[in-house]
Every structure is written in structure tokens, then in C-alpha cells.
Image: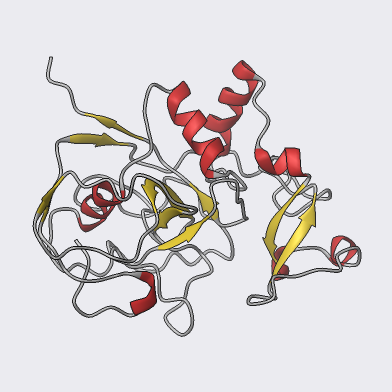
């Protein structure tokens, strides 16, 4: 896990270290809009983006009509705009919909939203170690499970060839939440089933997204990582579920 040749040192990509994970299941794909709708329909769940009545969207994805009413931006990343009423149902704001994106990954879901969905499924979010092991698909020092996806935004969750573990779109589609609290300090000593700190302010996300590119956001790598607060949501952030492996 990790690397001794980090691209983003401040992200805590290193050091390389030996990690053992217990057997586990992981969803082959990210959770789709269709799957998330089934959860909402059964539980009447309301996402945090819907409660807050806004979420962050890449400015090039927003219509000019919606953009005209936005007066703020993220200071360090002005291409991210807080769009009123953006949510999983309306990914780019009030004049957008998902009628042609039922098989795309659900986005604008916070860590808290994702965790609730996984619990509803009788599953959980993967740990960072499990996620990275799944991404590498049994190979050491693997940078990518496959190449770029070629979509302007999100791609359907079952697009493109699977890696050797059968997982699809594990990098380069949407960032995926993990169970771990964020830290950039890692021991180089071998460990078994690590789960990160016991508490924190941010949760780890992995996999990069359709916005990543080697020239500025080279994070569609198995070892790359980033973080957000558990109530954060955005137009390039989703998740997939995992579960403990139990022998019959």
C-alpha cells in the first residue's frame, strides 16, 4: 500500500508499506442512480445536498442560465461552484435531470449518505486499504487499473473492461468514499487490516474522477488519495459498497 515515489507528498501517498487485508467482498461497480433511487423510494431518505439545497459542480457542466445566479466559488478552485438545488436528482442544478443517466454513478452524495445506503444494503464502505488492494488487483506498484475513459462527465458504471478482480471504473469516473478518517502520517511497519485513525474531520476518498488529468490532478492512480468532510458532496463524488467475507 502507498508508494515511495509520491506525486503529491502532502496527500500522504507514502511510504510504501506491507498491508494484509482480510477477505472481503466489493461491489463490481459504483452505486448507480437507479440503485440509489431504490434506496430513496423505500426509505424516503433525503441526502445532505438536498437538505443544504446546494452542492458543488464543475463550472463547465453548468448552463449559462444557472450560472448567472451564482455569486460564489471555491477560492482555491474557482472552477467549483456551489449550485443551488444541485443534487443526485439534478446533478447540474434545477434545469438538469438523470432521465438518461440511470446507469451512471450516483453523485452529490456525502459520506453520511453513502454510509446510510451501504447499511441499508447490509454492507459497508470499504476501508482505504481494501479499496487500494482492489484497485491494484493483486499487483504491486500498479499505477492504474486501465486507461482513460473518454467521457466528458461520468460514464455508465459498467463501462470499459474490468480489472483482474472484476471491478469496473475504479479510477477515473468518480471519486469514491472509503470508511477511513483522513491522515497523512503512515507507519512503514507491516500491518493487518488497517482502518485509519479513530476520529478526524475528513474522510478519505479514492480513485480520482473524470476531471483528473496528469497535467494538473494526477489522482486517477491506485495510491492517490484525497479528502472531504463527511457532509460534503460534489458532482464527481460517489461510492461503492463492500462487506466482510463470511464462509458458509
Q: Which of 53 and 219 is in front in this view?
A: 53
Q: Is residue 8 visible?
A: no
Q: Is residue 212 visible?
A: yes
Residue at 60 percent across and 16 percent down: it is: 42
Residue 222 screen position, x and y as percent? 29, 63
Residue at 48 percent across and 67 percent down: it is: 150
Q: In which quarter of the image is the N terminus?
A: bottom left
Q: Which of 218 and 227 is in front in this view?
A: 227
Residue at 43 percent across and 23 percent down: it is: 121
Judged from this view, the residue extending furthest toward the bottom is: 215
Coloring scheme used: secondary structure
Question: In the displayed structure, does residue 101 sit left or right of residue 185?
Answer: right
Judged from this view, the residue extending furthest toward the front is: 199
Q: How many labels does the image show?
A: 0
The image quadrant that residue 63 belongs to is bottom right
Q: Where 151 sits versus 181, above or below?
A: below
Q: Quadrant of the C terminus?
A: top left
Residue 184 screen position, x and y as percent? 34, 66
The image quadrant that residue 56 belongs to is bottom right
Q: Where 52 sits versus 219, above or below?
A: above
Question: In the displayed structure, does residue 116 sit left or right of residue 198?
Answer: right
Residue at 24 percent across and 63 percent down: it is: 186
Residue 211 screen position, x and y as percent? 53, 69
Q: Where 66 sits versus 71, above or below?
A: above
Residue 34 screen position, x and y as percent? 57, 32
Amino acid at each position: 500500500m502507498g508508494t515511495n515515489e509520491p506525486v503529491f507528498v502532502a496527500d500522504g501517498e507514502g511510504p510504501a508499506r506491507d498491508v494484509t487485508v482480510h477477505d472481503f467482498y466489493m461491489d463490481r461497480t459504483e452505486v448507480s442512480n437507479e440503485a440509489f433511487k431504490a434506496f430513496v423510494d423505500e426509505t424516503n431518505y433525503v441526502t445532505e445536498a438536498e437538505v443544504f439545497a446546494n452542492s458543488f459542480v464543475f463550472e463547465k457542466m453548468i448552463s449559462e442560465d444557472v450560472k448567472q445566479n451564482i455569486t460564489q466559488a471555491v477560492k482555491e478552485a474557482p472552477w467549483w461552484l456551489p449550485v443551488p438545488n444541485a443534487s443526485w436528482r439534478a446533478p447540474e442544478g434545477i434545469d438538469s435531470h438523470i432521465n438518461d443517466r440511470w446507469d451512471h454513478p450516483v453523485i452529490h452524495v456525502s459520506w453520511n449518505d453513502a454510509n446510510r445506503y451501504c447499511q441499508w444494503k447490509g454492507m459497508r464502505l470499504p476501508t482505504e486499504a481494501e479499496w487500494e488492494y482492489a484497485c491494484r488487483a493483486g499487483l504491486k506498484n500498479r499505477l492504474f487499473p486501465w486507461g482513460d475513459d473518454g467521457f466528458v462527465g461520468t460514464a455508465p458504471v459498467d463501462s470499459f473492461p474490468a480489472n483482474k478482480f472484476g471491478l469496473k471504473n475504479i479510477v477515473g469516473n468518480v471519486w469514491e468514499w472509503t470508511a477511513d478518517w483522513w491522515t497523512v502520517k503512515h507507519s512503514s511497519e507491516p500491518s493487518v487490516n488497517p482502518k485509519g485513525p479513530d476520529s478526524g474531520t475528513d474522510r478519505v476518498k479514492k480513485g480520482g474522477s473524470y476531471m483528473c488529468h496528469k497535467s494538473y490532478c494526477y489522482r486517477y492512480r491506485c495510491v492517490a488519495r484525497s479528502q472531504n468532510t463527511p457532509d460534503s458532496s460534489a458532482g464527481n463524488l460517489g461510492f461503492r459498497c463492500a462487506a466482510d467475507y463470511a464462509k458458509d
